[in-house]
Amino acid sequence: MSNVTSKPRLPGLPALFLAGLISGLALPPVGQWWVLAFTLPVYLWRMETVADRAWGKGFTSGLCFGTGYFMAAFHWIAFAFFINPADIWMMPFAVGGLALFMAGYWGIASALVLAVPAVVAPRWLLSVLFLSVAEWLRGHLLTGFPWSVPGLVADGMGAVAQLASLVGMNGLTLLVLLWAALPAVVWWQWRYTRRLHVSALAVLLLLPLSEAWGLWRLQQNPTDYSTVMVRLVQPNISQDDKWRADNAADIFSTLTELSRDGAAGAAGLIVWPESSVPFLLDEDRPALARIAGLLSPDRTLLAGAIRRDRAADGAERYYTSVIAVNAQGEVSGRYDKWRLVPGGEFLPWEDFLTRLGFRKVVSLPESFTAGPGPQNLEVPGLGLVAPLVCYEVIFPNRLVSEPRPRLLVNVTNDGWFGRSTGPFQHLAQARLRSIEQGLPLVRAANTGISAVIDPLGRIVASTELLARSVVDNLAPLPLAATAYARIGDLMLVLLLVIALLALRKAWS
């Protein structure tokens, strides 16, 4: 099929940027997923009018649309720079620079679309497929940063989100983009074959069918609980106070008081948030002794904490970790975060950027060291649990190690981002991980949103944002491993092949 040339040209690159910016309304917590059916076609229409092999125009089209989208998706990062006024000058580089860099994936994908002859597949279809692949790459290359992948839009689509158990977040990205594209594309190309209309209708019908299947799956799998009570502690310590040495005693007292037995009875597992105390907890014997006083036999505290190792040559390495403390006040296990936040916990190209005045948001004399990878911890009564520190929960791949755990434990500190969209998007991504894996997840945040999530992504208990609070709830039981948990992103490859073969034939 030749390119469609009868359509009037749209306004240029500013319209693409604006369409991308409006597309951010589809993401949590706004969740207006239907806006993509109006904004994505602006980009696809532009791609239809670009001349063959016009690499530069293809690149700038994807770059402008993507920059608008990622500016909307990442704007919450700006809140972190108001914690320390001396850092505000870095804010436009962090937000704008990150959005532009991530949009580069979309720009490259758009340029590559123009390398494929129109007889292979319609250009709009190639644009959707290549954007899906670009989003998969964005989650893997250069440590990966899959925040606000378009598949996250499914969080606002009700039971459709259950498809994550089959195709994962990246498969959802492809489906969401197809659903958003098809109504406008059929309207553009109404004069083409009946087979086109039938094929488009079949793909669009997957949307209500997915909703119906998701509702059935939710109905067939009510939340089942273990006998172990979990307490999630949300101290709501402001970032201004959190790292002041003179506040250490008060912060520790707040955490211990919130951890004492309450109306719900004795918790078998207590979870403190990421970097819960401003000192090295595993080296502080008096603090461990006080924790032991909270814990009766067969009870465990999992605490987000900074720890250090000393090498034989005296060099010190710091880790952001989860440590397990038993009723004897002993550290019975530890997990070291292995996916570190660029610019937050380590500075890429550190020697060069520090000369320009850049530094990490987290104030340590040196970058954190990455741990070895996913690792389970043993919790009496629950069995194996898989810790995830902060933004590790946004990665669908290599989430857990074998043997399969029974519970995901996410500790985080969303206090950096205030009352912005960031904490809500973080929670939505945690929900998707539960659906993908068929595993329940408990989430303890320094400030909201702490939550207990069942293996189908239902939030069964949660706190408010910016509130000092606790959550007491029985730990949900896991489901059997899902299709996605078994074969991962091979499902995306299968979807890409099916979409290309089926829709190419329909448009030929």
Image (tube, rainbow, N blue to C red):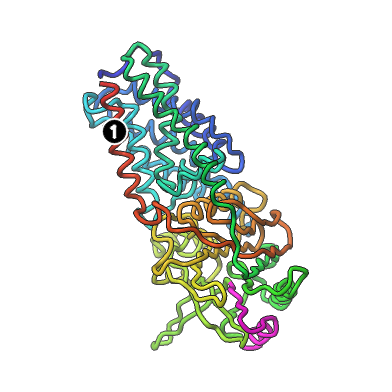
The percent coordinates of residue 483 (x first, y second) are 39, 52
Work out whether residue 35 or residue 472 is closer to the camera in this orientation and state it. Answer: 472
Q: Quadrant of residue 250?
A: bottom right
User: How many numbered discs?
Assistant: 1
Is 256 above or below relative to 410?
Answer: below
Work out whether residue 85 or residue 440 is closer to the camera in this orientation and state it. Answer: 440
The percent coordinates of residue 33 (x first, y second) are 54, 34
Residue with the mark numbered 1? 500
The percent coordinates of residue 339 (x first, y second) are 44, 63
What's drawn in magenta, residue-wise?
A: 285-303
Is 368 above or below relative to 390?
Answer: below
Residue depicted at x 61% and y 46%: 421
Of the residues shown, which amino acid type is indicated by label 1? Leu
Residue depicted at x 52% and y 63%: 408
The percent coordinates of residue 155 (x first, y second) are 54, 43
Q: Quadrant of residue 280?
A: bottom right
Residue 363 in the magenta stretch? The answer is no
Indicate left or right for 446 with 402 as reference: right
Q: Quadrant of the N terminus?
A: top left
Indicate left or right for 328 with 139 as reference: right
Work out whether residue 356 or residue 290 is closer to the camera in this orientation and state it. Answer: 290
Residue depicted at x 49% and y 27%: 37
Q: Quadrant of the C terminus?
A: top left
